[in-house]
Image: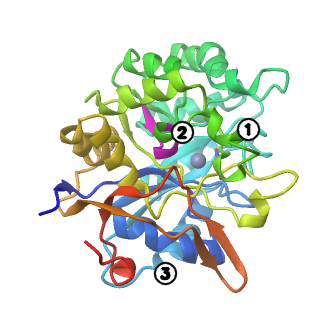
Amino acid sequence: MNQSITLRKPDDWHVHLRDDAMLEMSLPWTAEAFGRAIVMPNLSPAVITATQAMAYKERIVRLLPASSNFEPLMTCFLTDATDPLDVAKGFIDGILTAAKLYPANSTTNSATGVTEVHKIYPVLERMQQIGMPLLIHGEVTNREVDIFDREKIFIDTILTKLRHDLPELRIVLEHITTEEATQYISEAGDLTAATITPHHLMINRNAMFNGGVRPHMYCLPVAKREHHRLALRKAAVSGDTHFFLGTDSAPHLHQEKESACGCAGIFSAPIALELYAQVFDEEQALNKLEGFASINGANFYNKPVNEKTITLVKSSWEPPEEIPVSHNDYVCVFHPGLPLKWKYLRKGFNEANSNI
Ligand code: DOR
Ligand code: ZN
């Protein structure tokens, strides 16, 4: 008998589903494995109002099979001009679950992001009053700052001040990558939490330069030194409820990654659950996986935990390397080293991979 683990159905508290053909490709992977997902708003153009978020949600839901219980949780993209009333009404009406702060030019499709955090204080004050979570891409964008230091400097200069000025604001520092971030979050109290991606648990910065430039290992924030990866693994398996699952799965067409100026983003949705299981197994902490994947995030967002369960089986297998998007295009799946050690049986996948 293969070893198996059954968990309450997890949620993905940070995913890029995209739109159009890319949405059609990415959605089934996320919707089969997760009960809910926080859907990032950095489309082009970005989702900046509650009405746009509602329309985006409809485009997502229309693609789900009738039998699916998957729930997309919508966010809006903050700009210097965001209207506090629109954001607050969107949250109170149940259209928006959170708002996302991208410092301008910090990452993919973020040119219209926030130029100075103090410019959006009226929005943040309103969010604080109504308990609406602020999700943060935590990197400074000053090109003179070393790219490997941008998260730490964001915490030291921007996040610390923000929490001082708005101490009751609920904050998720997204896709943390450093030992300093794990330390900061573990000491920050119950209103501040962080998501951790599978790729930052599995690769360090060497993976981007292994025998040549590896564009499919490039994301933002970039993977850091090995000691940071080890700190992230320790935080994820610690049982500390301020850390929870957020894949940051972010598909780009392969030619947009394999280019003279390749896009940031790692597409992990087809294997993300399996990767987390592998990490927790390697850390001898499978008993902590359910808290990280299925409970801590729901509690932070004041949502009920999922009642359904999923089962993963310990089994060696090779996932697909490429997934087609419309006719001649494809995306490459994150490959941290094969074979994978755990498998979640997906409906679309059973036949091709029924060797367990
Ligand atoms: O690597 C990343 N890709 N980081 C982000 O913050 C955005 C994402 C994307 O949208 O491609
Ligand atoms: Zn992201």
Residue linked to disc 1: 106
Residue linked to disc 2: 203
Q: Which amino acid does label 3 sit on?
A: Leu
Could you tell me residue 310's position as x and y percent? 22, 63
Q: Is residue 134 shown above or below 22?
A: above
User: Is residue 94 visible to us here?
Assistant: no
Q: Rounded to the nearest whole Å, what is the CA distance between mark 2 and mark 3? A: 33 Å
Q: Is residue 256 shown above or below 327?
A: above
Residue beneath the point at 67% across and 32% down: 120
Viewer-nearest residue: 235 or 300: 235
Residue beneath the point at 64% across and 47% down: 217
Q: Quadrant of residue 155?
A: top right
Eye-nearest disc, 2 or 3 = 2
Could you tell me residue 2's position as x and y percent? 16, 61
Residue beneath the point at 65% across and 58% down: 47
Q: Which amino acid does label 1 sit on?
A: Ser
Q: Which badge, 3 or 1, comes first in the chain's sequence? A: 3
Question: Cβ(mark 1) to ligand 1 < 8 Å?
Answer: yes
Eye-nearest disc, 2 or 1 = 2
In terms of secondary structure, where does tag 1 sit?
loop
Q: Which badge, 2 or 3, comes first in the chain's sequence? A: 3
Query: Which residues lie in the magenta part?
Result: 194-200
Residue 196 colored in magenta in the image: yes
Could you tell me residue 46's position as x and y percent? 70, 57
Residue linked to disc 3: 63
Viewer-nearest residue: 77 or 83: 77
Viewer-nearest residue: 202 or 94: 202
Residue 149 colored in magenta in the image: no
Q: In which quarter of the image is residue 3?
A: bottom left
Q: Rounded to the nearest whole Å, what is the CA distance between mark 3 and mark 1? A: 30 Å
Q: Rounded to the nearest whole Å, what is the CA distance between mark 2 and mark 1? A: 21 Å
